[in-house]
Image: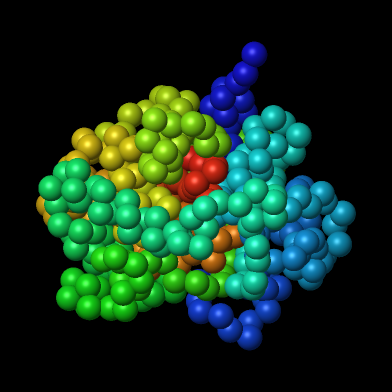
Amino acid sequence: MTSTLKELRPVYVVGIGMHRYQFMSDTTYIDLGLAAVRAALADAKIEWPTVQSAYIGRALLPMACGRPILRHLGASGIPIVHVENASASGSTAFRHACIEIASGLNDVSLVLGVDKPMPIARAESLTGIGNLADDAIAPFTHFALLGDQYASRYGVKAEDFALVAVKNHRNGSKNPFAQHQKERTLDEILGGKRISGTLTSLQCTPVGEGAAAVIVASEDGVRALGIDAARAVRVTASVGRSQRVYDNATRYDAMLTEETTKLALAEAGRAPADLDIVELHDAFTVEEVEYVEAMGLCPDGRAIHELKEGAFDIGGRCAVSPSGGLIAMGHPIGPTGVGQIAEIVRQLRGEAGPRQQPNAKIGLAHMVGVGAVCYVHVLEA
């Protein structure tokens, strides 16, 4: 017998905080994390001793990185859980904090994503089982090839994927927390450094550092702490899945996204047409095109056409990555999924300023992690 998040105690995001995503700097990861947590506490208007547990999403930092951050707020003795799940680390940490609150174990929990670039190796490389293409197909090559496949399949130009970057850099230029805050023309994006195939540097997520934090609470927690219920955003679905064997093995990310999104929307009792905001994993431009179709935001083969028509712009039918997405907002890995939640909460509160999607009521956050896992959350005002 299983239950969905919506069938358990209601879970709300009551506080959000960010440290800007940025290129590698001398800022310590402790300063990055503290800035985000303190901002989230201030946003919720609560004190640190009221937080009953903490989940730390990180992919690059060494073990037990959360304690050196949180001890600056006070040694309250709360349980601290560190979560690593590749690009979906922050999203996974958020899911488990939501489960804890929904189950009634606690009433207030912190989710912090924090990371700094440093050398890492995927555990898969240490299995002793090699891959014949390891030295030939890097991640950007894989997605460049996917772009070529899509262009051939639907009769669009490979250069059309750059329109995703035009939109997302435009959105990022309005976001004070984004790593890239400059609007770019199509010519600038196409004229950038070639990374692989038609992919240029401005069509790929930058490497960087940063932090994002959110505080989740139950209705009891909201009442007991006097939190402003009008600014609380409910989490109505939380779904995590891992990769299976698909008919088209080259599009495993899209297949996994389709499966996970369907489950999340069903859990929330919503349809793709209900979504006002989507924040998705667009480390490369082709990913946005593939994922909006996989999510059901438009029919297969129509994403480029609807992108050109402005359907995914701020002010369009559904604003896709109003934060700037991974391409402009950045992808420091550990914080990314948490930052998506913060952006959606800001939008659903009507507090996003120049990048505000009008009348936004329902948002969806999506992250994949090295193609092996996918997490999708639905939030509602």
Identified at 57% across, 29% down, the residue is 5
Quadrant housing residue 105: top right
Identified at 62% across, 18% down, the residue is 2
Extreme residue toward the front, this view: 132
From what the image shows, is residue 379 above or below residue 43? above
Q: Is residue 231 left or right of residue 305?
A: right
Q: Position of residue 40 (x, y in %)?
A: 60, 60
From what the image shows, is residue 24 above or below residue 63? below
Q: Position of residue 144 (x, y in %)?
A: 33, 59
Which scheme is used to colour this image of the protein? rainbow
Which quadrant of the rendered structure holds the N terminus? top right
Q: Nearer the viewer, residue 37 or 245?
A: 245
Quadrant housing residue 145: bottom left
Q: Nearer the viewer, residue 258 or 151?
A: 151
Number of marks: 0
Identified at 52% across, 73% down, the residue is 208
Extreme residue toward the top, this view: 1
The reply to whether residue 114 is visible in this rendering is yes
Q: Is residue 224 left or right of residue 207?
A: right
Q: Position of residue 179 (x, y in %)?
A: 44, 74
Q: Position of residue 379 (x, y in %)?
A: 46, 40
Q: Nearer the viewer, residue 190 or 137?
A: 137
Which quadrant of the rendered structure holds the C terminus? top left
The reply to whether residue 41 is visible in this rendering is no
Extreme residue toward the bottom, this view: 26
Identified at 73% across, 53% down, the residue is 82
